[in-house]
Image (cartoon, grey):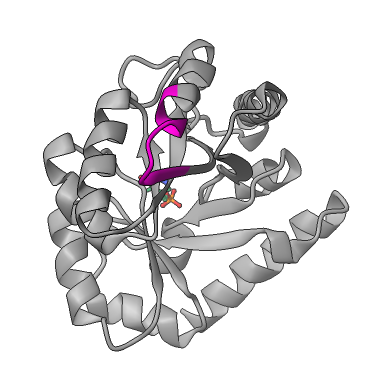
């Protein structure tokens, strides 16, 4: 795993420098869904510090098992409102907020534990019926609504683009996310921070970096294929 991690880190650096971006501004989220706590520990020992999980139950167990090692846990899966209570106790950043209903549930639970929960707004840039995320056209309104909640803080946007075999075909979707980010910034909404763009996975993270990603979510290239 050491070699795989080093290879990914080098590729991130190379992609950043190729477009004159500071590699330090791009953080690697190691997506460990379905992988064992033992494998995550191995990744921690390779120096990785941020882990992404998709399922609350699975994540909860792993986070408890690995609590002796400092790490930051991000939620990158679809979140049901009835799991908001667990989500706020477990995760530093929730990448997948796409409705006011979910925003309200997180706000309520975060308030109970006296936390301000950092979140990203998930945008369905490809307008795919099978995917979660708010449509690009509705994003600004959702950001405005969620920005009024006292215990949820928006840090940026996230997308999972349509799956193509050629990485370059996903570039327009990443560009859509970046353009939306710029539009939100122009709206000058109080309490909204647009510093993060979560985009790019194993097959397309270099394209995402070129289009402005600050968080790349990589699973397969680090942990191998999932069952
Ligand atoms: C599983 C997953 C990833 C990681 O995908 P890989 O192709 O294995 O790198 C990234 N983002 C989300 C939202 C995921 O569900």
User: Which residue is depicted at the point 33% across and 82% down?
Assistant: 41
Look at the image and say whether residue 91 sits in the magenta stretch: no
Q: Is residue 58 above or below residue 175?
A: below
Q: Is residue 59 visible?
A: yes
The answer to which of 11 and 29 lies nearer the viewer is 29
x and y, in percent, of residue 67 in the image: 26, 82
Residue 106: name its quadrant.
top left
The answer to which of 6 and 125 lies nearer the viewer is 125
Look at the image and say whether residue 150 sits in the magenta stretch: yes
x and y, in percent, of residue 112 in the image: 19, 53
Q: Which residues fall within the magenta stretch?
A: 145-153
- Residue 195 placement, left or right of 84: right
Q: Is residue 158 above or below residue 196?
A: above
Q: Is residue 124 visible?
A: no
User: Which residue is depicted at the point 68% across and 30% down?
Assistant: 185
User: Which residue is depicted at the point 48% across and 26% down?
Assistant: 143
Q: Count all numbered tags in the image, as a single digit.
A: 0
User: In which quadrant of the rendered image does the C terminus lie?
Assistant: bottom left
Q: Residue furthest top?
A: 137
x and y, in percent, of residue 53 in the image: 31, 56
x and y, in percent, of residue 206 in the image: 67, 49
Residue 69: name its quadrant.
bottom left
């Amino acid at each position: 795993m050491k070699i795989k991690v080093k290879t990914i880190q080098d590729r991130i650096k190379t992609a950043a420098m190729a477009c004159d971006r500071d590699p330090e501004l791009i953080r690697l989220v190691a997506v460990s869904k379905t992988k064992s706590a033992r494998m995550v520990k191995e990744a921690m020992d390779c120096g990785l510090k941020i882990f992404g999980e998709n399922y609350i139950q699975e994540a909860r167990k792993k986070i408890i098992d690995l609590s002796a090692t400092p790490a930051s846990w991000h939620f990158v899966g679809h979140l049901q409102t009835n799991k908001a209570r667990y989500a706020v106790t477990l995760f530093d950043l929730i990448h997948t907020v796409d409705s006011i209903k979910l925003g309200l549930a997180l706000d309520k639970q975060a308030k109970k534990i006296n936390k301000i929960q950092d979140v990203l707004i998930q945008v369905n840039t490809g307008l795919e019926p099978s995917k979660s995320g708010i449509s690009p056209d509705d994003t600004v309104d959702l950001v405005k609504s969620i920005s009024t909640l006292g215990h949820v803080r928006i840090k940026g946007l996230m997308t999972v683009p349509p799956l193509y075999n050629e990485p370059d075909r996903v570039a327009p979707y990443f560009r859509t996310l970046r353009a939306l980010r710029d539009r939100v910034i122009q709206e000058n909404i109080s309490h909204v921070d647009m510093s993060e763009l979560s985009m790019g996975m194993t097959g397309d993270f270099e394209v995402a970096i070129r289009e402005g990603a600050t968080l790349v979510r990589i699973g397969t290239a680090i942990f191998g294929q999932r069952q």
